[in-house]
Image (spheres, coloured by chain):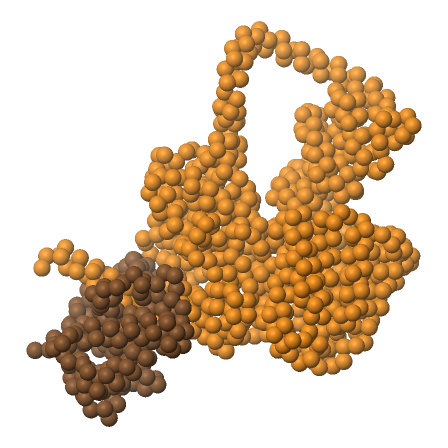
Chain colours: A brown, B orange
Amino acid sequence: MVGGREPNRLHLSRTTTQLLADLKDPANSLAWEAFDSRYRPIVVGFLRKLGCNEADAQDVAQDTMARFCKLYADGKYERDKGRLRSWIVGIARYRMMSHARGDAKQIALPAGSIVGKLPDDDALEEVFEVEHRAAMLREAMNRLRASGVGEKTVRVLELLSRDGLKPGAIAESLAMKPEEVYVAKSRGLAKLRDVLAEVRHEYEPGSEP
Amino acid sequence: MSDSDRHSDDDALLADLGDALRSDEDNKPPPPNFPGYEVEGEISRGGQGVVYLAYHPKTKRRVAIKTLLTRTVEGAKQLARFEREVELVAALRHPGIVTLYDSGVTEEVVPYLVMEYIEGERIDRALRPALESGNRNRIVEAVALVCDAIGAAHQRGIIHRDLKPSNVLFDTDGRPRVVDFGLARETETPTAADGVTLEGEFVGTLVYSTPEQVSGGEHLVDVRTDVYALGLLAYQLLLGRLPYDIGGSLAELVDAISHQEPVRPRKLDQAISADLEAVVLKSLSKSQESRYPSAQAFGDDLRAAISGLPVNARRHDRRYLLRKTLWRHRYAVATASFIVLLIAASAIATGVLYYRAERARQLELAAKESEISLSEAWVTSVSAVNRETSDANISTVDELLDEMSLIIEEQLAGQPERLAEVRAALGRAYLGQNETAKARARLEASLSLLHEIPEVSDQELAEAEHALATAVFDDGDYAEAERLRRSALDRYLSSVGSDSPQVAEARLLLGVSLLESRQLAAARAEFEASLELRRRLFGDDSEEVANSLNSLARCAAAEGNDEEAATLAAEAVERLERALEGNDNWRLARVLTNAARYIVDRPSAPDEAAETVHGRYDEAERLLGRAMEITRLWEGSQGRDIAGTLRALVRLQIQRGQLLRRFREDPTEAFSKGLEYGTQLVEAMERVSGELHPDVAEAYSERGAVGMTSERYDEAERDFRKALEIYNKLYPSNHQLVGWGEALVGAVLTRQGDYDEAERLLVSGRDKVIAALGPDHPRSQTVIARVEHAARWRAYYEPLGRPNDGAALPPVPGR
């Protein structure tokens, strides 16, 4: 999220293909914000998975997004030459290594960092893909919450998934009957699937008809 | 799609969602600002707080910073309490405990702790392979190490209160390290009555709560709460599950913790030995009384269980003990038992008759001979002092006592009553000489002799138990002292009745034992019962009531109820004054000094008006003035009691000076008074003990402390060097007191900017103190803290190229 301002919902719900089209116009800051808020958390998560600490991940993600914007505006990205994912991963990886070399602010790659052990782009892309899927799920949860399905239903899903609680304990903690928890779970998941399909359609370039 | 397909799809979606939500939490929100530290990332995040990995450039140390979301420190009182707790925990140094370096409060008023960063994983994950391969000894050894660490904390009066697998990390050396002592949890553990209002995330903590925590609340928490949690840890690590069903509702869980007996470990895993099962189950007793009295006792029994030694958990079982003993001596037993069998058949019948007759004869004889042989023993041992008539080289009381012990044991053999009595007398004499171990041995021997004599009354046994408890207590074995005090109390209850002075005294003494092992609620109950009984028996205005009030005041101070402590101590003074009717004695002086100390030690809240605090200090000064007057009358100006009062006066002036400085007023007068009292202390001690005595050195270091606080570093250095000089003359160079003196001088040199010499002395001092006393001794911990403190000063001031000259410099980090 840039500057804490919420980007226009119109842009948020646009497909990545549409956003990319909008980005061709360098003045379209709304498109940029929407694109940034969609991809920056994924890049941060991706870098964190590679062993970057939080501050460095934020720095490198900032560099990556800026670099992407510049290259894109310069027309360096050609859709048919490769996927968007590979392209972002390539930039992020390059920026990270250049940080590590000390070109920019010095960062220390932790001993356990997997960067050095992942020479092939496929493996890196897989990490990115995991983050991408997680981002879609989180966005789906946000939309589920906003859809009027009810806070309790959302809480049930969170407690089941994130906290790994048993339905009995959830019933107790949310003052629900156990059968209500099961109903909430099954309705919540059904609705989540619908919303997720919608999000996937928007997020995955080329997934639109 | 079939039902089972749908289920597995749902599960997969929930698993992905869980990962997504958790990984999101990893990346936000931004960490708070921790002054002096550079946050590098998040280690973990939970309902109670977030743990960050951070770097401290000043010390070049990687640390873990934990925010405590469940604690608030908004009020001055809460802040003061938090800081006091941190101070206590920060003093803990143990290889099994993660060191607490620093603490603070963020701009959002969230308190945080800065701890040693441990690379490793949770104990349950680290020991999973051991569980799967059936390596139970490895697990038991690990839990015993955790017991050692917790036991060390208990000895410092700190209870963990929140032990669970996530609070025990396995470091890269495979050693368990405990984190989060007591500080993480301020809010009371919700009880069954709180029921359904609990948030889901709380459940995770609840499963590791103890019966007393879920049913009675926090005031019942004592060292045995940690024992239970350790038992839970052992159970979980050994069996991969908790001892009761946690799948049900919250109310069911609370009920299970409170009432459901644990599933027997052998029912789940038959390879677990009956001993190990008994040990684990004892630690998990629902009632605190039935658990091990200390973490150490639990650890010892765990180790016994895997090494084939008899375990305490089954000591009530005589057949078990016999079997164990036979097993340990199985080869000797095999041959001996054959011979025993041969003679036993004929011997038993005659043996019983013989024993009775012999016993009667012995008693008669003993009555006649005891006076003679006792005086013989006495004469023989005292004459050993005479070098001309004895080979024994006796020059001290200790040596005399040792010699007497040997002679008396020999001469009084066969007269158990006499021997028991003399052993007890010797034990008490050793106690007076601070020879705790020897005192304990004699008193134990005396008590066990008494147990063998059928005619001995409950009262005699109770007295012997009390005497032994004193030695055991001085030895630091609070659990055993408590057991003895309890036993003595029971004997009095059954022999002289509940409304007796003996019971009142026994309760008081039991309370003192409980207080030392931080079982504050139980201690308070005993003190209150003793006080109530004494009020009835002796009337309000009696020495006995004053004595009980004084003890209750100590308990209140330990609970952190400083105001109550001061009020009780003031009442003690009042009662004792009336009881004595003008015949002031040293007891009154001590009670007055104590009352003053509670006032001085009570931390003043940051927002408290200066006048209020000064008012308190004035009162303390008045009390100490009276104590001084009495002591002078009682023992002249050279007694030892006067030293206690003068020491309190020195500390009072240090506090007052610091208060004045905080409010930007002139502290000179207070510090000058402090120096004056310090000088009186030095002079008094020199008069009493001569110039070469550790008490004199201590007096110099007290005065040096005033110099240190008032930034008169030259004077402080002179005093500390004098203390060191005395220690050097009295002791060999590796003696802990020499180390202590070096650390004092090192500390003041740090302030003067002589970092190299300071470091040399501090490190040398620290090593000597630790070598002599072990790393857990309070003095070792003080020295360790001094070395670290000095390192911080160096890191701070050295780059500035000057010593701290008292100018307005930024505060030392972490202060």
Which residue is at the far bottom?
A: A27
Q: Where is residue B521 shown, x and y percent of the image? A: 59, 54
Q: Residue at x 29, y 61 (%)?
A: A117
Q: Residue at x 63, y 13 (%)?
A: B352
Which residue is at the far left?
A: A209
Front position in the image: B145 or B739: B739
Q: Quadrant of residue B134?
A: top left
Where B155 falls versus B319 (above or below)?
A: below
Front position in the image: B801 or A112: B801
Front position in the image: B144 or B812: B812
Where B545 falls versus B328 (above or below)?
A: below
Give left or right: position of B309 versus B738: left
- Quadrant where the N terminus of chain B sits is bottom left
Give left or right: position of B438 versus B309: right
Q: Where is residue B128 shown, x and y percent of the image? A: 35, 47
Where B113 falls versus A13 (above or below)?
A: above
Q: Residue at x 71, y 54 (%)?
A: B739
Front position in the image: B794 or A120: A120
- How many labels, in total? 0
Give left or right: position of B541 versus B191: right
- Quadrant where the C terminus of chain B sits is bottom right
Q: Where is residue A57 shown, x and y percent of the image? A: 35, 73
Q: In which quarter of the image is residue B659?
A: bottom right
Q: Where is residue B167 shown, x and y percent of the image? A: 45, 56
Q: Residue at x 41, y 33 (%)?
A: B273
Q: Is residue B613 visible?
A: no
Q: Is residue A193 visible?
A: yes
